[in-house]
Image (tube, rainbow, N blue to C red):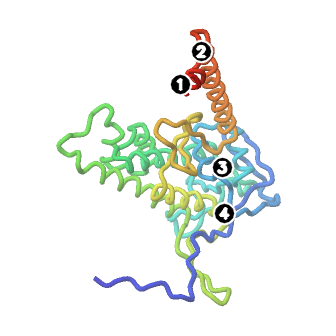
Amino acid sequence: MTRPAALPRNLRLVPNASGGWYVPADVCVVRDALVSPEAQAWTVVTQCDGLLDKFVRLANAEGGEIAEFTRQCGLLFLCKHRRPLMHPDGARPCKPLGLDAGMIRTPLSAWRRYAAEARATLLLATALRHGGLGDPAHWQTLYEVWDTPPITLRRLADSDKWPLDASEANRWPALARGLVASVVKQWLALGDVRLRFHWLAERPDISVGVAFPQAALFGELAMQLMTAVAGRDLAVCSHCGSPYVPPRKPRAGERNYCNNEACRKFGAQARASETYRRKKERLTRRKDAQARGGNHGQAHKGQR
């Protein structure tokens, strides 16, 4: 078999060169949508700490929480199809919802739909990586948003009601992994993520990214989703239950907390309470030992 050619030395492979995406100066909740004036000054950012972790929390979020995410991390530009503007269904990009009225409008239901899909995908990938098939409820989430769901997805979503045939147990993990991979590939296509060739400086660059800032937030989320599914293990926050990528793998039975400020604060309080409880237990044991006529330290001292 012919081996692929090595990357020429005068090229650089840049992991992500999306060029950044838009963060609105002002956004508000109007009925069932986020609304931002189209004429305002937009800020372009190239990163947002904990972007994917924060995004998956929006699956069950109120409008105010989604608006706060938008102010920090950016806005999804969706068209009338409730898809990113660069989605591959048409011959040319669509217009953002609300643009004809001088605004950018994104339905809250669309935010929750994509956040729920990403969350389910992450949790299923973690289960598959550890030898399981995942929670049927998470497969049900994918089934509900899949345009033309395959029968295998329906069976996995219903596996809590009608168990999978034990005689075919060996084939289900591969089918399940293929379904998760299909979700990731669909996100990459919707976000217009592709290899791009740049030659502005002396050395050309090959990068993976998105060309237009209007699509770049979704593209960045797609790339982070791909990296999380393919790479490091995820953890589930002991406080809020959301999946996240931890800085280190938690030990078995160890409580762990995501990057959300409320969860970190709760974790700090929980650790402080646990430290206080253990200290109190040690003090109680010491007093009990003294009441019985001595403590371990005195016993040791007497034996020397």
Q: Secondary structure at mark 2?
A: loop
Name, please, the residue furthest toward the left. Answer: 167
Q: Are marks 3 and 2 in contact (CB under 8 Å)?
A: no
Picture quarter containing residue 80?
bottom right
Q: Earlier in the sequence, mark 3 or mark 1?
A: 3
Q: Earlier in the sequence, mark 4 or mark 2?
A: 4
The amino acid on which the numbered mark 3 sits, given as a three-letter code, is Thr
In the rendered image, residue 176, in percent from the top left (x then y), is placed at 34, 50
Tell me how far mark 3 sits from mark 1, CA to CA: 76 Å
Q: How many marks?
A: 4
The amino acid on which the numbered mark 2 sits, given as a three-letter code, is Gly
Q: What residue does disc 3 label?
A: 106
Q: What residue does disc 4 label?
A: 214
Observer-side mark, 4 or 1, equals 1
The quadrant of the image that shows the C terminus is: top right
The residue sitting at 61% across, 18% down in the picture is 286
Q: What residue does disc 1 label?
A: 303
Observer-side mark, 4 or 2, equals 2
Q: Earlier in the sequence, mark 4 or mark 1?
A: 4
Q: Earlier in the sequence, mark 3 or mark 4?
A: 3
In the rendered image, residue 170, in percent from the top left (x then y), is placed at 23, 49
Tell me how far mark 4 sits from mark 1, CA to CA: 77 Å
The amino acid on which the numbered mark 1 sits, given as a three-letter code, is Gln
Observer-side mark, 3 or 1, equals 1
Picture quarter containing residue 220?
bottom right
